[in-house]
Image: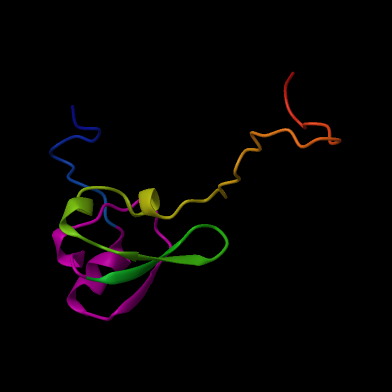
């Protein structure tokens, strides 16, 4: 089931439509909600994650998804699984 009405089409910001014609190698994109169109295939873009731009290579498998799906906004923190002798574990008991 599509998320958006078919007659509306996929959402792409106006400046991205202008950017399609200019084949620049490094493009900065602040619109995380825009859909990736086939014109962006084989391009390297910088997607803003709220703090810094993240480099992303657009492939055919990413067409139809949103730009924001490929620039994570949260850090991954590894969980501590082993309890070290003499230290208390910070977590649920």
Q: Is residue 59 above or below residue 26?
A: above
Tell me where residue 79 appears, x and y as whole percent: 62, 38
Q: In the figure, residue 89 lies in which quadrant?
A: top right
Is 3 magenta? The answer is no
Q: In the figure, residue 52 lies in which quadrant?
A: bottom right
**Given the current orientation, which residue lies at the most extreme right position?**
86
Q: Is residue 89 above or below residue 62?
A: above
Residue situated in front as seen by the camera: 39 or 18: 39
Q: Which residues are magenta?
A: 13-42
Is 47 situated left or right of 61 in this image?
A: right
Tell me what residue is drawn at x 73 percent, y 33 percent.
Answer: 83
- Label count reads 0
Tell me what residue is drawn at x 83 percent, y 32 percent.
Answer: 88
User: What colour scheme governs how the chains and residues are painted in the rendered image of this protein?
Assistant: rainbow
Residue situated in front as seen by the camera: 27 or 7: 27
Tell me where residue 84 appears, x and y as whole percent: 76, 37
Tell me where residue 23 appears, x and y as whole percent: 21, 79
Tell me where residue 65 appears, x and y as whole percent: 26, 47
Residue situated in front as seen by the camera: 63 or 78: 78
Q: Could you tell me which quadrant the C terminus lies in?
A: top right
């Amino acid at each position: 089931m599509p998320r958006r009405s078919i007659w509306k089409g996929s959402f792409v910001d106006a400046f991205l439509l202008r950017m399609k014609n200019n084949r620049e190698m490094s493009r900065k994109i602040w619109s995380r909600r825009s859909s990736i169109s086939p014109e962006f295939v084989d391009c390297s873009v910088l997607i803003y994650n709220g703090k810094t731009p993240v480099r992303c290579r657009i492939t055919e498998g990413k067409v139809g998804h949103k730009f924001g799906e490929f620039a994570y906004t949260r850090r991954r923190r590894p969980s501590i699984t082993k309890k070290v002798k003499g230290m208390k574990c910070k977590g649920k008991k």
